[in-house]
Amino acid sequence: MAASMESEMLTSALFILNLFSIVPCVVMKIPQVWTLYTLKTARGISFTSIFLELFSHTVFMMYMFVLAKPLMQYAEYIFLVTQEWVVILLILNYSDQLDIRVIALASLYFLSTTIIGGDLTPRWFPTFLLALSTPISVCSAMFQIVAICQSKDSGSVSFLSWFIAWATGFARILTSFLTGEFVVLASYVPTNILRVIGCATILYYRPSPKKFR
């Protein structure tokens, strides 16, 4: 009876944590999209950071999909990669770099995800990419932090998006621990530490209201 109750409590805890991870991610990048659209500038935003983040999230999604993990453990990434493409297009647009190269980049992206998601690669390949995604995710956060420090202006970077990323990342640390996914757990910890630093950096370099007058 005790074992059954513990199992039910674990299942309930995982369900709640999974929901907390997924639901905010449905709109995580919306504040960033709105900030870019409103200000019409990408100053302080690192394109490299967003692109690496897209790569990292896509790899994780493909890893979980190919290994037939429960959808509740990675559903948020479906929404995240879609929103990240919108952010990328807006950054390129407001940086006057939206040209035919975007079509080539998008074609390469969708071809690669189709090959990996279609299980047309060796079984070890998604795991190999997941191992790469951790340093890439760390680099993504570091590039954005450095970009803000260099420009000394975080007005175009959404604090809310970064905070949601940290909160959902923390929830994923808990779900990974509870399910014994220690490889996945290891990929979340360093990135989430940098998200705390990123949130602090955004607040520190937040432009004063006078700059917008």
Image (cartoon, rainbow, N blue to C red):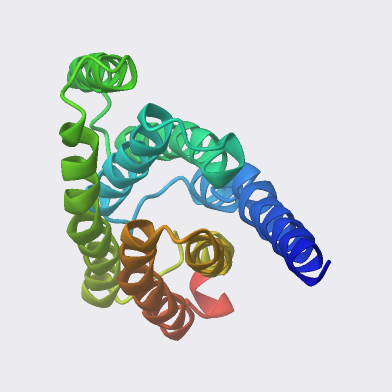
Q: Quadrant of the C terminus?
A: bottom right
Q: Position of residue 172 (x, y in %)?
A: 52, 61
Q: Is residue 53 above or below residue 92?
A: below
* Residue at point 84%, 66% (across, down): 1
In the foreground, 106 or 209:
106
Left/right of residue 211 with respect to residue 145 in the rendered view: right
Residue 126 location, quadrant: top left
- Give the residue at the far front of this rendering: 1
Q: Is residue 45 above or below residue 70?
A: below
Left/right of residue 142 with respect to residue 70 in the rendered view: left
In the foreground, 154 or 27:
27
Q: Position of residue 144 (x, y in %)?
A: 29, 64
In the foreground, 179 or 97:
179
* Residue at point 55%, 46% (across, down): 73
Is residue 160 something one can see in this rendering? yes
Q: Position of residue 23 (x, y in %)?
A: 69, 48
* Residue at point 30%, 39% (across, down): 59
Q: Position of residue 80 (x, y in %)?
A: 49, 41
In the foreground, 201 or 169:
169
